[in-house]
Every structure is written in structure tokens, then in C-alpha cells.
Image: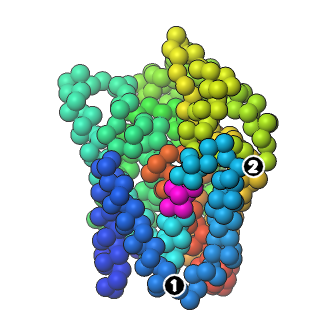
Amino acid sequence: MEVYPAGRNTWQKVLFLVLISGLIFAAIHKWSTMVRVVLQLGLFIYVVWRKRGELFKSLVKMPLLPVTVYVLFVGLTVPFSVDAFESIQSWVRLLEMYMIAVSIYHLMETSSAVCTGLFYIMVAFGIAYIVDIQCYLRRLGDEWVWGQIWDNPINFDHHNTYSAICIALLPISATFILVGRQLWMRIVVAVVFLMGLFLIHILQSRTTQVSLVFIMFVTGFLLSTVRRKIIYIALAAFVVFAAAINIKYINPRWLDASVRTGLGRTENWKNALTLIKERPLIGYGYGRKIYRDVYFERFGELVFNGHRFRIPHAHSGYLDRLFASGAVGLLLFLWIAVTAFAGLFREIIHRSEDWIVARAILLSLAGTFFYFLADIHDGVQWALMWVFLALAMRLSRMCARNPSVCSEG
């Protein structure tokens, strides 16, 4: 994995410096939405200008075709939404993700560009990690003990969302540590990796920790030889077993009675399926407010542990897609994921020159989509998923353009 911190030529230097500055600014300032949007628009306009001869063709061909179709479908369902204004706002945010994906796809044209982009992303989030960890330790001071939760992080709004970001970055950072060519870069990434593990501990998201276990075992199946698979999976099983018998030190929330109902998730899922059956094809429309209002009107507030509260969302990315856009929307969304995963698997199986990077991105996406079983996307985590999907499609495109490389090994 080769990284050029400022790019090889002038435009790359300017682009990456602006990109990393924007990512860092967006990561550590909640009020920076306008700055982030301006940067994304500027980046997209640059891509439109630089790739004007091939941009449109790429949007209606594989691998970007599923993304284009999904975004258009969501836009076409706005008139059928129970709250058109809310759905328009959500569609605009989806268009923002679309611009990010298209920009990343067209800018990361080489292996070194992909690795450099990934490195900058980790640096940006690493700075956000530092901000939260030092605030956490300073706030608790001498009172901190193992098992003390950080349930009100400075960045990324919610401890589940924050943990999901940490999970998505772990396979990338681990890969850089193992195969990165520059020692200084490996050291930087190792620090980010350790901070990510520490945050996963103190944020105490149970969904994310299960996702981490899932990633660990998937990693074993992607190793190159049967012997390595067996040894790794045995070691992973031992680590999971050791964590399970010491769970009160790792995450005491697993000992709560709420584990059986997932903090009200089971009732929420049952009621969400009832609503979905009433509008199964194109759903109720996009927008977090729509689910909250429709659910409350039909089922009222959820009572849990003596507290009453309105359900904010379906607590499952797949049920969320079914509710918002029906079976058609979910299938189109899964088409995007299948396209990305298929391209990455092809890289890994054929041992192309980028197969190690492809494996890292596949593991990140696998953890993210597993996480969606019991939680939903949110904010920066959602944007990071689109970045990784775009990189997955770019890697598969590079392989398709050079099939002789894909047949090596």
C-alpha cells in the first residue's frame, strides 16, 4: 500500500489538502454543515469539468448504474410520500451522498490514489478520536474505571453511530499496519487503530461489538490458505471466548436485562413490519420524521423500563429502507451493495494487484451492512459508507480495464 501524502502532481496536492482539511473540519465541528456542502459541491463541479467527456456515460453504465437508478427512484417516489416536504429534504441529502460517491469514483483512478485517500480519511477521523478521548478522560479524571461508558460523545452525535465509524475504519487501519510501505504512516495508523478499539470499549455499542466479531470471522475466510484460515479462526474464537467471560469489564451493558428486547427493538420491529405490509411496494417516503409520526399515530409511545418515548426510527437499516421506499427501494439499495461486494470478491479471488486493499474495504462494508441489521445509518457514518462503496466500484473498474492483472496469482 503506497501513500503519497500530498499527491504526485499539483492538482492532487491541492485536491487532497482541501479534502483532508474539509474532512477534519467537518469531523470536529458540528456546525460545519455549510462548509462541508460547499467543499462537496466544489469537488463535484471539479469532477464534472475534468471528466465532462465520460461522466454521463459512467452514470448509466456499470458499476455506477445501480447508484443512479436508486437515487432516481427515491426522487420519483417523493410525490407518493405521506410528507412530501420531508421526503424532498431527505432526497437532497441522498443527492449529496450521490455527489460524494461519483466524485470519489472518478478521482481515485489509481491504486496509490485510493490508498492515499483512505489514509487521509483515517487521519481526519483520528483527529476526531483524539478530541473525544481527551474530553472523556479529562471529564472523568480520577473517577474513570473500566466499563465507564462515554454516552455523550463530542463528535458524531450518538455513541452507536460513533462506534459504527470506528468499526468501519478498523479493517482499513489494520491493513495499513500490516502491509503499509512507509514506517511513519504505519505508526500513525497504528495510533488510530488503538484509539478506535478504545472508543469501541468506552462507547459500549452492543450492535457494533457484535459487528466486530462478525468482521473478525469473515476475515478468516478471506485469508489465502486453508492453514491460515484454520489458525486465524481458532485464534479469533479464543479471543471472543475470552471477551465473553470478561464481558463485565469490556461492556457491562451486555449484562442488562434490556439485552432480551434490544432496548425495545423487538416491539419496534414487529410494529414496523405491520406498517410495511400496508404499503409494501414504494413505502411511506424518506425522512426520519415520517417514521416517527406514522409510528406514533398508529401505536403511540413505546413504554420501556418505566419510560415513555416516541420511536424515532425503525432501528434497522433494512426495515428503514422497506418502510421508506418499499420492496422496490430496498432491492435497488441492495443492488448497489451486491455490485460493490461482487467487484471486491472478484479482486480477492483472482489476487489482482489491489486485492489486499479490496479485502480491507470489503471487511469495512461487511461490518457496516451487518450493523444495519439492528441499527440505522446516520450522518457521517452514512457518508463513509458511500465513500467505501465508490472505492469498491472504482477498484472493480480498474480490474475490469486490466483483466490480465486480475488473472495473476
Which tag, 2 or 1, sits closer to the chain's start?
A: 1
Foreground mark, 2 or 1? 2
Give above or below for 317 relative to 142: below
Circle 2 SS class = loop
- The magenta stretch is 90-97
Q: Which quarter of the picture shows residue 32? A: bottom left
- The tag on residue 282 is 2
Q: Residue at x 61, y 36 (%)?
A: 291
From the viewer's perspective, tell me whether residue 194 is left or right of residue 140: right
Find residue 255 and report its horizontal and vertical position in percent: 51, 18
Q: Is residue 130 magenta?
A: no
Q: Secondary structure of the magenta portion, mostly?
A: helix
Find residue 269 and report its horizontal and vertical position in percent: 68, 30
The C terminus - image quarter: bottom right
Identify which residue, 22 or 347, lies in the foreground. 22
Q: Is residue 94 magenta?
A: yes
- The tag on residue 51 is 1
Circle 1 SS class = loop
Q: Amino acid at mark 1?
A: Lys
